[in-house]
Amino acid sequence: MASKAWFKPSALPQLVARFEPPSPSQHAKRRAVEVWTTSCIVTNFGMNCNGADESARGDETDHLPRCSTLVNPANPNLTGPHTFPYFPRGGPQPKAQPNRHAHHIMGFVSQWGGMDSGSGMMFSAETIDGLVHQLGGVGLRAECSLVPTHEFSRAYINQQDTTLDLNGDDAKKMAKCPVGAAVMTSPGGDNLRKHYDCIVHTTPPFYNHPPLESEELQKVLGIERGVSDLHWWSRELLRSCYRQSFGVAFACRQQMLEDRQNSLVHRAMHLVGINGNPAERMANRRVAVPLLGAGCRAFPKDVALDAAALESTAWLADDGQQLARGTSLDNNESAIAFGLLERAEAESLAANIDRLMQDMT
């Protein structure tokens, strides 16, 4: 399962392919998109990789992703698995926490937050969002609880195509990270901070249960209507997750620091003694990205791979336009590093990117 964060820290990531702009401009020449296989993108892609036993493996550990930012597939209220109930693969999310009869394994566990996986169930430490919140601890949970309602929320009718009221309030007024949007937080606790400087949270849609479509939502997310079919809206929302995440992850560092320092979230965290500041390693602009949508959101693998390839290629080809929107001018490399569980999926993603790159030349 592509979004499953297997916790196997002994396995080093393996680079499958690396892509650079075909005709690099002054500002794009240090951009790159990389495709890797990894057993766990959370612990094996950061600045302090669990799998990097440098004394034993020597030069092999020089060829690791070493990302400073992680894209985390989250839920609209950024609760991690703590209050996000069990749901069948592909959704929709039910209103109430499940009872012991909802799944045959539920009579033997005391914590929910899992998803159906055939004859068994995935629980928090087996998913990226769950592991991020487990390692981020109370610091990350506190910061996420203080994130304000997202400015895009006014454009949403709901967060999945159901009349279900998930939280006792109007969902469009409550979402901290609406479907298709992205927000940034610090890593929270030291167990996650040692790996990453920043976490970018984004909420993918359920493939068969996306938010209701509206012209206003298309406008705020930058979605243009193309050839419509049954799942075009789900695909566009998934692509928006990548666009919004890349925009947040590669935003001007100085502007981001100023925004955080002036935010109510940062001030409140400072008052209670929680360090919500990114570390100084942020100059290394390498962003770890899982394959969004292909796990519990139930996107077909080929659809999820297409979305990842299209948006990463578009970012790679954007030679200087992001500069005008505030992208940093430092001399450090900007890179997107995809981490996929299966070699075959990584090779398929690399082939899709390569095909798109050739079409650009």
Image (cartoon, rainbow, N blue to C red):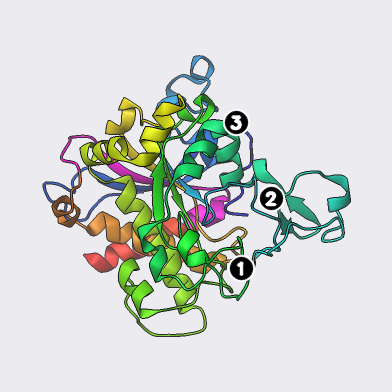
Quarter assignment of residue 295: bottom right
| Residue 87 against residue 29 in the figure, above or below | below
Q: Say which residue label 3 marks.
A: 9
Q: Residues within 10 Å of mark 1 (few under 14, many from 20)?
A: some
Q: Amino acid at mark 3?
A: Pro
Which secondary structure, mark 3?
A: loop
Region of the chain picked out in magenta, as a range = 328-347
x and y percent of residue 339 in the render? 48, 46
Horizontal arrangement in the rendering, residue 168 relative to residue 279 (left or right): right
Q: Are marks 1 and 2 in contact (CB under 8 Å)?
A: no
Q: Give the structural element (helix, strand or loop) at label 2.
A: loop
Vertical side of 273 occupied by 153: above or below: below
Tell me the distance, in whole angstroms, between the alpha carbons under discs 2 and 3: 23 Å
Q: Gap in Å between the C-alphas at discs 1 and 2?
A: 18 Å
Residue designated by label 2: 113
Residue at (44% x, 70% y) in the render:
156
